[in-house]
Structures are given as C-alpha cells and as structure tokens.
Amino acid sequence: ILNVEQSPQSLHVQEGDSTNFTCSFPSSNFYALHWYRWETAKSPEALFVMTLNGDEKKKGRISATLNTKEGYSYLYIKGSQPEDSATYLCAFPPGTDSWGKLQFGAGTQVVVTP
Amino acid sequence: DGGITQSPKYLFRKEGQNVTLSCEQNLNHDAMYWYRQDPGQGLRLIYYSQIVNDFQKGDIAEGYSVSREKKESFPLTVTSAQKNPTAFYLCASSISKGEQYFGPGTRLTVT
C-alpha cells in the first residue's frame, strides 16, 4: 500500500482568512492526483484531477498546485467561508495500469468559523 | 436525475450473518468501486470493477465479495469471514480514469 499523507490533520480558520494544506505522495511512477471535498452528511465530491507537473487548477475560491518531481500538492482556499468547512481528501493511483486503485490520505478537516 | 444510490442508509446484522449492500448508478459509468471508512482513517478500497463481468481486489478485500453482472449495479457482500465488519461503506463510479462520483454511503453495524 502506497503512503499518501495529508497535513495538517485539522485546521481552524476565521471567515475571510485564506489557508492551505498539503498532500504528499510517492513521486515515482506518478499517474494522477485527485482532490475531493467531503462535507458532513454528504457524499465526497470531486474537486480536481491533476496529471501534469506544475499544473494549477482552480474552482471558485479553491485552487490546487502539483509538484510531481518532489511528490506534493497544495490545496488553497482563498477568503474562507463557513460553507468551505469540510474534510479535504487527496488520492493517488499507483500507476497507469492501476488507475482505479486509489490510495486515499486520511484528510485535512477544515473548520471555518464566522 | 443521474447519480449513485446506496441502500439501505443504516444496516444492522448479527455476527455470523452475511449481508449484501446495494449500489446502483445511472451515470453510464464503466467503473465502480467500494470503499470502507473507519474513524481516523482514509477511505480504503475493497474492490473495484473497470468493466462489466470483471472486478479486482483492492487493499482490504478479505471477507468481502462482489459481482458486476450489469453496468448499473455493483453489490458488495460482507461475509461472516470479515473480522471487523462494522464500518461506513461508500460506493463510487467513474468514467474510466476520471474523477469518482460517490453515493451517500451505508453504515453497517454488526453485533
């Protein structure tokens, strides 16, 4: 089982502040990196699937960057709002032939307080 | 209204009984997945299927079985051989290698 690590485990953010957190993954045999948002009482929802080194993706106030050479991805939330409160998961398939076999990190829980 | 449905939302069983969790999708996705979540851990893959009539073991397949007879359906059976079956189970689907779409989950309690 490959090791996908997320840090920090949890974050408390004031409304309006920006924040970021990390997903680390093995850099060898990289294929893709997935980011998901999981709100309480809802299903996990895909944010991004990133494949290229240096890639940057954006969805509203949330953006992500990818460094495949050093094995990390950052997720940024700009101007946090209470509705951004969720657990953010990253996931990594071990290779092209195993693209369906996602290894998930334990997640970063973000709590945005008004 | 396309999506993934899982039923039931809560399921209670006695130890030693097999139980089948339902997962249905109408998104026309080829690939389907079963995950398990335990407190403090990430999602762990139980089984996945990339195409009808074919499936592969994930990281924690022991004590579970699946079938994929139809594109829309991927039921998971938790057998009596699974030592710690109490958990939250999530089903997902995807178009080949893309993002996964998740169902609402089934919380299984075995006593």
Image (cartoon, helix red, strand yellow):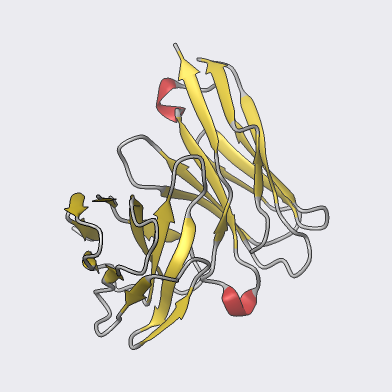
Q: Left or right? Give the position of B15 relative to A58.
A: left
Q: Does B13 sit above or below residue B81? A: above
The quadrant in which residue A83 appears is top left
Q: Quadrant of the N terminus of chain A?
A: bottom right
| Residue under the point 20% across and 56% down | B14
Task: Evaluate whether residue B41 shows in this view.
Answer: yes
Tell me residue A84's x, y (percent): 45, 29
Q: Does A6 sit above or below residue A12? A: below
Q: Quadrant of the C terminus of chain A?
A: top left
Q: Does A15 sit above or below residue A35? A: above
| Residue under the point 28% across and 70% down | B77
Tell me residue B98's x, y (percent): 49, 66
- Please tell me how many numbered marks the rendered image carries: 0
Q: Left or right? Give the position of B11 relative to A69.
A: left
Task: Evaluate whether residue B25 shows in this view.
Answer: no
Tell me residue A16's x, y (percent): 53, 15
Tell me residue A61's x, y (percent): 53, 32
Taking the view exactly as shown, the residue that stands out farthest to the bottom is: B53
| Residue under the point 34% across and 75% down | B65
| Residue under the point 46% across and 14% down | A113
Q: Nearer the viewer, residue A28 or B40?
A: B40
